[in-house]
């Protein structure tokens, strides 16, 4: 019973993925962490969203051990574990193969910041971590995927509380946030930013990136000390 | 009770936005004005459309004071206020980040008039107001956004009763009309015009704009003195 | 009561348009003819599909006189009249501003035949009638639109029983068939052909048109003397 | 009664096609085989999916003889027959004209492997069999289509258990699998791979194919001896 909260939270987050049109079949997963217990609940691998139940969520620790649950956890579980372990402010993680974000990942390019919808959520291009080296792929692949994300954020000096999304070149996006619901929200936002950036560049390949003043203004009005978006 | 009509009207208009596929999450807002009382009702900031109730609409005056309502109004309220105050024939306003219209805004380009669907609604390209200067952005941003629209219409000698839509470069569209319902209708029309103009130019980048005779004919049959579209 | 069949037929056909995603708001209309009485039933102008009732269908003759009905008929009624009067084998007509077909019309280009889906329905490119001259536009526009289609088919030696669709450059498509239902079916097929031709040329701008043998084979197996598609 | 299983299986598979947005009207069909009896059940030709019933499925043998059923089988039945007869491990086959996969077929190009979503299902480009010669088209066309697929797989040394999909240039895709449900699953996956490859190349026409190590890794974790995706 002590994992009830995170299992419910992970379940509700996973159920949003098909409703937000972010997954085909079982191509995605979301998780929620209990920081006090250092365990997280994640979608079981390959189970259709329509058959998913809260009690099916698998609870695992950072060493990939199943703490509760009879099903095999998502094959991407180790990537979630690395991110949770390193970034202690993260409460939930989401991974999808959503169409437009994945196409940018396959194009191996960051998603340029071209408008205020983007700046409402982050003030820089959505980063794209490079394709991993063969050794990392052939080794502990999912663990290395997590490390790849962390390393890239460190190298670029990015703050995971300000940039809550990343593309893995040749693969797909990961997003995170204070909760599993927020991580899923970020996946849906990312998909729309990816779609609009694609269309924008088709319309005008020469367009300039969004000017600095607009980036700050839109980000600050939603996330700054004096934010005035939403109901506190 | 005296704000009941505009609160109902604003509520119904806002409820149309997700049904018309014009908003993701809370990325949009519509308002309705009472010209006798010089106040308008607008969506509360950041409240999901599925949870919205007519009584939640916030009634504000032109000086951004809340006249009725317990929630914080949309962060774009001041833009609505400027437009209402300057353009006295406007009865409703709508702002969305709809995918195709926003992509043209991000491309910082007007939407060219390429067909009769466009001419049924306006006889010129959909105007795109330029990106604001840094001072306006850093100052009273939402107020300045409204001023930016008015100034651009004045500079281009546009009539807001004939051109009921605008793109803000780097941001997104605003639309308006005789009522909040008409403003939302214009947002949906704009989105489709934006989508078809995008596709048309992908198919034939060299295509000429619509000839003058067709522009007038289609606009006049719907809006002219001898209009014969619709039931009176 | 003697117009009941065509009013029902026109009503059912019009109701399909939003279900098939071919219209935004009221941007489309379908009609059905009674050849014995030389009258046809058509959608009333500007009435939302959700409010449409079979009894609202307007019955008109070839001289644009209302024979039955209290509402104003579609503004495109005269175009329907010309097509019915000239092409005596036509039983139903449909006009939409569907997204992809209209984009090809705006691009002022025929839709090239690139695959068997197209050849299942017609063996040549979907024709695109040129933009009308100013005099025709300023005169009896909707009547001239019908004449423009007929003239173009005559000039190109096209058979309206084999080619049941046309684009009007700068405007949108018209389709027809043995019944109103078949005309609507053709509008939906045209929209999908337009979408796939667009995508095909984006993927490979140099692709060759479909070879003659495949055109004949697919058309004949559905429409030839020895057709073996469907249940007779 | 002895064909009940395959009729049910074919029925359920066909019903998935419109739900997965893979067919317009009747443009697709799925079948299921009984290897013991050497017969398969397939959709009747031209029957709308909404009217389909399990008892309408037509049971045929490899010589195109109807073994059970009163309706005419799909016009593509002979193609299914050739594939079943040659590839004895196949349990179900699906044919659609889904938008993006068909556009690649019309572009007469294989779908390049650009990401791990693709590698999760096959480690090479989705093959595109060339347009048939005129003699094959004019002869026993649907039989020849099956032969064309087999010949192309043999020529390229492809294993139909590893590559469960193919495009026919100028036509559309065929997919197969251990069951009719798996064949339909593969059609949906193919459509998404086709869509993402299209978008990826629009974003970055110069992007490199997915590196070998990622292809193997993703395929093996789902299909290899040590697969760890799903619940066994």
Image (cartoon, coloured by chain):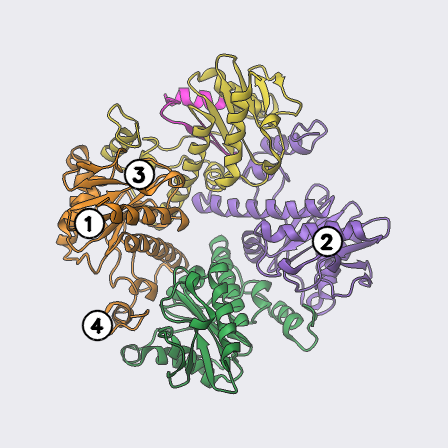
Chain colours: A yellow, B orange, C green, D purple
Q: Secondary structure at mark 1?
A: strand
Label 1 crowd (10 A; few <14 / some 14-19 / many >=20): some
> What whole-number distance in Å separates the C-alpha atoms at marks 1 and 4?
28 Å
Query: Considering only vertical position in the picture, is A37 above or below B168?
Result: above
Which residue is labeled 2 in the image? Answer: D31
Q: Which mark is residue B225?
A: 4
Badge 1 vs badge 4, beta-carbon distance below 8 Å: no
Q: Which mark is residue C205?
A: none
Residue B54: x and y in percent read 32, 43
Q: Which mark is residue B34?
A: 1
> On the rendered image, what quadrant is the N terminus of chain A found in?
top right
> For the view shown, which residue lies furthest in the front direction?
B1
* Residue D97 appears left or right of D224: left
Query: Considering only vertical position in the picture, is A186 above or below D10?
Result: above
> What whole-number distance in Å separates the C-alpha atoms at marks 4 and 3?
40 Å
Residue C92: x and y in percent read 50, 76
Residue B31: x and y in percent read 26, 46
Q: Chain of mark 3?
A: B
Q: Chain of mark 4?
A: B
Q: Secondary structure at mark 4?
A: loop
Closer to us: mark 4 or mark 3? 3
Which residue is labeled 3 in the image? Answer: B56
| First-in-chain label (1 vs 4) | 1
* Residue D92 appears left or right of D27: right
Both marks 1 and 4 on one chain:
yes
Both marks 4 and 3 on one chain:
yes
Q: Secondary structure at mark 2?
A: strand
> On the rendered image, what quadrant is the C terminus of chain A found in?
top left
């Amino acid at each position: 019973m002590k994992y009830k909260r995170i299992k419910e939270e992970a379940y509700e987050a996973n159920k949003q993925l098909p409703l937000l049109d972010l997954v085909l079949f079982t191509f995605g997963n979301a998780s929620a962490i209990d920081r006090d217990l250092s365990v997280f609940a994640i979608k079981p691998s390959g189970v259709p969203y329509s058959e998913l139940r809260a009690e099916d969520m698998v609870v695992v620790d950072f060493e990939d051990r199943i703490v509760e649950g009879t099903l095999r956890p998502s094959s991407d579980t180790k990537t979630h574990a690395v991110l949770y372990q390193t970034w202690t402010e993260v409460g939930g993680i989401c991974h999808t193969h959503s169409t437009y974000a994945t196409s940018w990942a396959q194009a191996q390019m960051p998603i340029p910041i071209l408008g205020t919808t983007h700046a409402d959520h982050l003030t820089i291009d959505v980063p794209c971590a490079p394709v991993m080296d063969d050794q990392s792929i052939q080794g502990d692949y999912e663990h290395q995927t997590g490390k790849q994300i962390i390393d890239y954020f460190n190298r670029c000096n990015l703050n995971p509380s300000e940039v809550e999304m990343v593309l893995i070149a040749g693969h797909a996006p990961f997003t995170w946030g204070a909760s599993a619901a927020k991580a899923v929200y970020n996946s849906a936002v990312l998909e729309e930013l990816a779609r609009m950036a694609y269309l924008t560049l088709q319309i005008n390949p020469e367009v300039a990136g969004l000017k600095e003043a607009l980036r700050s203004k839109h980000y600050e009005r939603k996330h700054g000390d004096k934010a005035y978006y939403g109901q506190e």
